Image: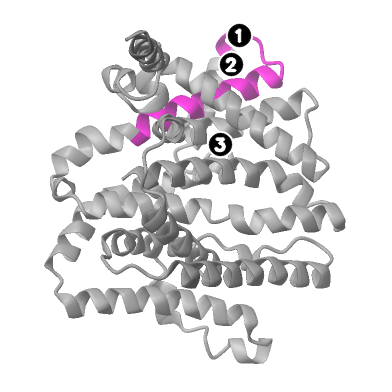
């Protein structure tokens, strides 16, 4: 699954870009905004891509039917790092507010941790709450999909397509026509806000044996991207402020665009790459960390008011997250809480011990 490494790396960059560009996008409309909007339309495929990869991996694996594997391994790999980075963000907030170390800070941290059970402490963490919920029903999904025949699979795909097409039509129809598509049945089928459909779609995209022509996928991707970018521009200009209806991550154009990107990588980018392999292994903790790092940047005055500043801050955030998470993965007591990986696994795949071994191996090969 080498192409997953490439997709995870790009998706991780996309997520960091989205949150870094949020201030510019919600600011004054103009040339800088229009330029940022172009990249934002592409970056919003990040969450659908992450969900598609998770959907393929979980729903293709018979181990998903084993509830003990789910509860002992898979859920802790998500829940423990989520708790770790949630605590660090809450601690950062206490420090930023000038709360002294002591009983008051502990009481505040406990209150905030209890509140975090119902909602994420920072916006980017919403994805983890959704993913955890989907993981909990993954045995049901795997069991159901495994029992379907060819007609059943086509039926599920048609439902997913109808849900996405309905949302797309709602974007383009005038107000008087939208009432005919506001069907309660389809609204109730949008489980987890539509993200469950994307999760299941990843299973079908990853397992399809049929190769589509690259020119067709590129044309479709270009057309969808143009619709997203132009649509966002038009409705935002009409409203006088940023409107993200065309950039919806849970259904619609972005999901279809992410599907094209998924298939393009699957068909053309399945060669291993040492750099993306390591980044992909650290993509989860980097995702969890980037929001806190962005808040730290903001607290010291590092704001992004232009597209170039957004890009620079995105790359900086990405690089710092990589270095810190890689370092945490090298510290045995912190490896699992920070990354969700066992220290031994991190030493074989992504931490500084792994990198040192690779360097020594290359040097010895050159000497030979």
In the rendered image, which quarter contains the N terminus? Answer: top left
Residue assigned mark 3? 121
Q: Main secondary structure of the magenta part?
A: helix
Q: Is residue 247 left or right of residue 135?
A: right
Residue assigned mark 2? 105
Q: Is residue 122 left or right of residue 37?
A: left
Q: Residue at 78% across / 48% down in the picture?
A: 24
Residue 58 is a magenta residue: no
Q: How many marks?
A: 3
Mark drawn on residue 101: 1
- Measured as percent of width and height from the top left, residue 37 is found at 72, 57
In the rendered image, which quarter contains the C terminus? Answer: top left
Whether tag 2 and tag 1 are in contact, CB under 8 A, the answer is yes
Q: Which residues are magenta?
A: 78-103
Q: CA distance from mark 1 to mark 3?
A: 20 Å
Whether tag 2 and tag 3 are in contact, CB under 8 A, the answer is no
Q: Residues within 10 Å of mark 3 (few under 14, many from 20)?
A: many
Element under disc 1? loop
């Amino acid at each position: 699954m080498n192409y997953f490494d490439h997709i995870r790396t790009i998706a991780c960059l996309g997520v960091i870009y989205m949150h870094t560009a949020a201030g510019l996008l919600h600011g004054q409309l103009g040339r800088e905004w229009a330029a940022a909007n172009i990249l934002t339309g592409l970056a919003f495929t990040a969450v659908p891509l992450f969900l598609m990869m998770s959907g393929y991996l979980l729903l293709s694996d018979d181990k998903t039917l084993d509830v003990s594997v789910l509860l002992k391994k898979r859920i802790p790999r998500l829940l423990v790092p989520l708790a770790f980075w949630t605590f660090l963000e809450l601690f950062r907030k206490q420090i930023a507010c000038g709360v002294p170390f002591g009983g008051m800070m502990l009481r505040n941290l406990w209150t905030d941790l209890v509140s975090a059970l119902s909602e994420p402490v920072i916006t980017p963490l919403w994805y983890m709450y959704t993913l955890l919920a989907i993981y909990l029903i993954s045995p049901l999904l795997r069991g159901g999909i495994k029992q379907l025949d060819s007609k059943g699979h086509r039926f599920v795909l048609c439902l997913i397509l109808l849900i996405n097409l309905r949302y797309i039509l709602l974007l383009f129809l005038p107000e008087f026509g939208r009432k005919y598509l506001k069907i309660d049945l389809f609204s109730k089928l949008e489980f987890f806000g539509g993200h469950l459909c994307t999760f299941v779609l990843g299973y079908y995209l990853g397992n399809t044996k049929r190769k589509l022509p690259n020119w067709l996928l590129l044309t479709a991707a270009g057309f969808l991207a143009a619709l997203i970018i132009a649509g966002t521009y038009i409705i935002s200009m009409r409203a006088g402020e940023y409107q993200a209806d065309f950039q919806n991550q849970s259904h619609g154009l972005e999901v279809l665009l992410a599907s094209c990107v998924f298939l393009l990588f699957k068909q053309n980018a399945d060669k291993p790459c040492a750099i993306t392999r390591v980044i992909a292994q650290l993509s989860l903790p980097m995702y969890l960390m980037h929001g806190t790092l962005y808040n730290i940047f903001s607290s010291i005055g590092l704001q992004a008011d232009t597209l170039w500043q957004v890009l620079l801050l995105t790359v900086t955030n990405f690089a710092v997250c990589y270095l810190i998470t890689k370092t945490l993965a090298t510290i045995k007591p912190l490896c699992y809480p920070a990354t969700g990986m066992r220290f031994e696994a991190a030493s074989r795949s992504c931490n500084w011990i792994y990198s040192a071994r690779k360097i020594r191996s290359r040097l010895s090969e050159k000497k030979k």
